[in-house]
Image (cartoon, rainbow, N blue to C red):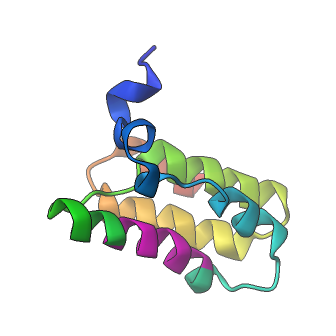
Amino acid sequence: MPLVIEYDPFRFTFSWYSLIGLSDKLYLDTTESAEQLLGLGGSHYDAVFLKLGNRVLPSEGYINFHAQGFLDASRPNVALVFLNLNLQNYPQSANAHEALGD
């Protein structure tokens, strides 16, 4: 089992990289559309790109976790947008295809 620091060391090293509060916004504000919710995460990764000069994608597991959360919260339209993001970011991933099939 990998340590979290192995796959996302930036959030433990740089305060500006933190995603704290994003999960609350994702689940507690049911008025925002799927596109608006994706924009929240997208703006975070855009800021990372500006600071590091290197494109960083959200991990496949992170997106799947939130997609499952939206399914559990009876928001399948939002979950579908998140699962499609994984297909866009990781087109060769069998897991991304399987998650969408579930």
Residue at screen point 51% across, 79% down = 39
Which secondary structure dominates the residues rendered in magenta? helix
Residue 91 magenta-drawn? no
Q: Looking at the picture, does residue 100 appear above or below residue 37?
A: above
The residue closer to the viewer here, 21 or 1, is 21
Residue shown at the point (68%, 86%) measured from the top left: 33
Residue 69 appears left or right of 57: right
How far across and down, in percent of the image, does residue 93 sit?
33, 46
Q: Quadrant of residue 88?
A: bottom left
How many labels sit on residues? Answer: 0
Vertical side of 7 occupied by 27: above or below: below
Q: Magenta stretch containing residue 43, yes or no?
A: yes
51 with respect to 40 (left or right): left
Give percent across and percent down for residue 89: 32, 61
The part of the image, by quadrant, that contains residue 32 is: bottom right
Where does residue 100 sit, x and y in percent of width and height?
Answer: 54, 57
Picture layout, residue 13 above or below residue 23: above
Extreme-top residue of the structure: 1
Residue closest to the eye, 36 or 87: 36
Q: Which residues are magenta?
A: 37-46
Between 89 and 6, which is closer to the camera in this rendering?
Answer: 6
Image point (34%, 70%), residue name: 47
- The spot of residue 94 in percent (x, y) is 37, 43
The front one of 86 and 38 is 38
Say which residue appears at 33% left-offset and 73% top-offset: 46
Furthest-left residue in this view: 53
In this rendering, would 56 be left or right of 37? left
